[in-house]
Image (cartoon, rainbow, N blue to C red):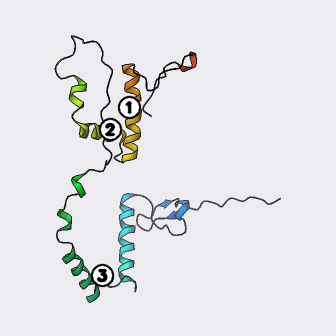
Amino acid sequence: MKKITRRKKRKRKCRHCREFYLPDPRNRWHQRYCSKPECRKASKADGQRRWLTSPKGRGYFEGEDNIRRVREWRAAHPEYWKRERAGGRDALQDVLFGEVVAAQGVSGRLNASALQDLLTPQPALLVGLIAKLTGNALQDDIAEASRRLIILGRDILQTPLIKPKGGIGDAAKTHTMS
């Protein structure tokens, strides 16, 4: 039977602050600086200095070939940074359609600016709010959060997504935004 041995974790001295630290196991062969912000800056500066003085990095963006290439690209793409996105669309490409809610009794407590009236014509507000709440602006994450919120809203308004087929096991469940 083969004996399993574990490597001993060795501390290193940071080249910048001179304090001992445990290197990241994924990069232990190359890491020479600790993870403090000022040491990370020193590491970046040292790496940049080494690149610029190396034969490969010396004059990397210099020379007539690179100057000509950049001038041609700029001529072919004038003011590229000022253009709007194609179609003026945001990161969220899918259109979120409103949902028809079953009519409920009129309550004297509702005023002219009911929540449904306020939010229906403002899909950008809803998308922004969902992105803020979830902390993510990716389309797939917003769509998933929207699905969870719709289910939760249906539970609150008591309009189920699928009609229960009967039985105790089909009772309404509460949903959480986790």
Residue 125 picture location, percent across and down: 24, 38
Residue position for label 1: 149
- Seen in the image, is 173 located left or right of residue 60? right
Amino acid identity at mark 2: Ile
Dot 3: element: loop
Q: Position of residue 124 (x, y in %)?
A: 24, 40
Check if mark 2's residue and mark 3's residue have beta carbons within 8 Å: no
Residue that badge 2 annotates: 130
Foreground: disc 3 or disc 1: 1
Earlier-in-chain disc, 1 versus 2: 2
Mark 2 or 3, nearer chain start: 3
Which of 127 and 95 lies nearest the eye of the viewer? 95
Give the answer, above or below, for where 154 lies relative to 54. above
Q: Secondary structure at mark 1?
A: helix
Location of residue 149 (image quadrant): top left
Give x and y (percent) for residue 103.
30, 18
Tell me which amino acid carries mark 3.
Phe
36 or 167: nearer the viewer:
167
Q: Position of residue 9 (x, y in %)?
A: 60, 59
Distance from label 1 to label 2 (Cα)? 9 Å
Which residue is label 3 attached to?
61
C-alpha gap between disc 2 and disc 3: 43 Å
What residue is at 18 percent from the left and 23 percent from the top?
113
**Mark 1 vs 2: CB contact within 8 A:** yes
Callout 2 secondary element: helix
How packed mark 2 is, by other alpha carbons closer than 10 Å (few <14, some 14-19, many 20 or more), is: some
Rendered position, 21 above or below 71 = above
